[in-house]
Image (cartoon, grey):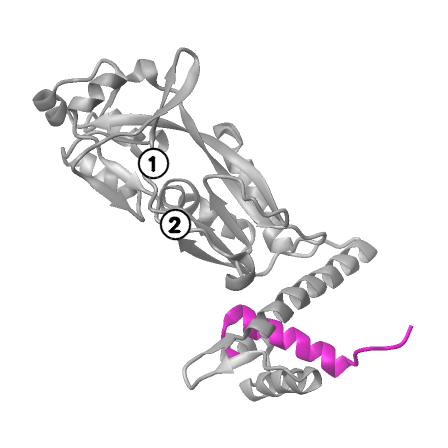
Amino acid sequence: MKRQFDDVQLGSIELFCLAAELASFTAAATAAGVTPAAVSRSVSRLEERMGVRLFVRTTRQIRLTDAGRAYFEQCRDALAQLVEAERQATGQQVAPAGVLRISMPTPYAHYRVLPILAEFRERHPQVRVEVHISNRNIDFAEESFDLAIRGRAPDESNLIARKLEDAELVIVGTPGYLKRAGKPKSPDDLERHECILFDLPSSGRRIPWLFMEDGAMTERMMDGAYSTAGDVLGGVTLARNGAGLFQTYRFVIERDLQAGTLVEVLPSFGGASRPFVLIYPHSRHMSARVRSFVDFLVEKLRDRGA
């Protein structure tokens, strides 16, 4: 087999991946125990070899070019494969390390994942976690995310989807609102109530409310004077302050229900749910940090319908 890379080139690839991962030559140099100039020279050496620019450099920051991003994704997977091959050959366990980038929607971040991240880092202290909290869909290739949590499985065949749970939905309002407006006895009664609405940020499409009727899940479009977009917790805040009724996840308002500050309505039509799905790119050799987080999250959510 003809040799394609020498030791210097392999080292340059590792430094390039560090710089791409940390978005900084200085941070990459600190992590690798070399000087920022050495990182810069390594990147320039790769650019000269391939005849393409890998980074756009300014005085304040660096960012990957389109070619650099594609090269980084391939190199990161290749280096992870080398580490895995060494682990298997020696029978050693490689400690998860590096930056884990994950995108997730607001309610799942605040009420499910963020509360348990400290425990994950206690187990894997060499992993740095970057959490992107947003309800919009992300592009794994363009934005270099490792994982995402979303409300449905993706259409793309190159992505793996793993259900975390079916999250139960409930309709709630304050005791004060219900005293003023009356308590609905059926979904039809909601036409006479102030229903707080939520619009999907990606499409602007209004989310219907879900009910269990005659053993089947049904959906109805509600109407009301309040609508929120981008952050579903905005509807929760409105409901907590007596603006009207809102359908949300039970795990978001379970403490309110226990304290009596919110009251569940139409429980006989309850039981409907929406899924939360863990999504990540298909790769034959998943990095140790990604694998460890997937296993951790599934373990912690196992009793919640995972």
Circle nearer the N terminus (2, 1): 2
SS under mark 2: loop
Which amino acid lies under the numbered mark 2 shown in the image of this protein?
Answer: Ser
Q: Which residue is mark 2?
A: 202
For the stretch drawn in magenta, what is the main secondary structure?
helix
Residue at point 14%, 35% (across, down): 243
Residue at point 53%, 51% (across, down): 147
Image position of 281 (left or right of 277): right
Which amino acid lies under the numbered mark 1 shown in the image of this protein?
Answer: Ile
Q: Which mark is residue 56?
A: none
Residue at point 60%, 87% (across, down): 38
Image position of 50 (left or right of 106): right
> Is 152 above or below relative to 117?
above
Image position of 287 (left or right of 186): right
> Residue 224: horizontal and vertical position, in percent?
19, 33
* Residue 176: quadrant of the picture: top left
Depth order, front residue of 116/227? 227
Q: CA distance from mark 2 to mark 1?
A: 12 Å
Residue at point 36%, 46% (across, down): 106
> Residue 112: horizontal and vertical position, in percent?
41, 40
Q: Which residue is mark 1?
A: 207
SS under mark 1: loop
> Residue 223: horizontal and vertical position, in percent?
22, 32
Q: Give the quadrant of the N terminus.
A: bottom right
Image position of 274 (left or right of 14): left
* Residue 168: quadrant of the picture: top left
The stretch in magenta equals: 1-25
Residue that extends furthest to the top in the rendered view of this protein: 214
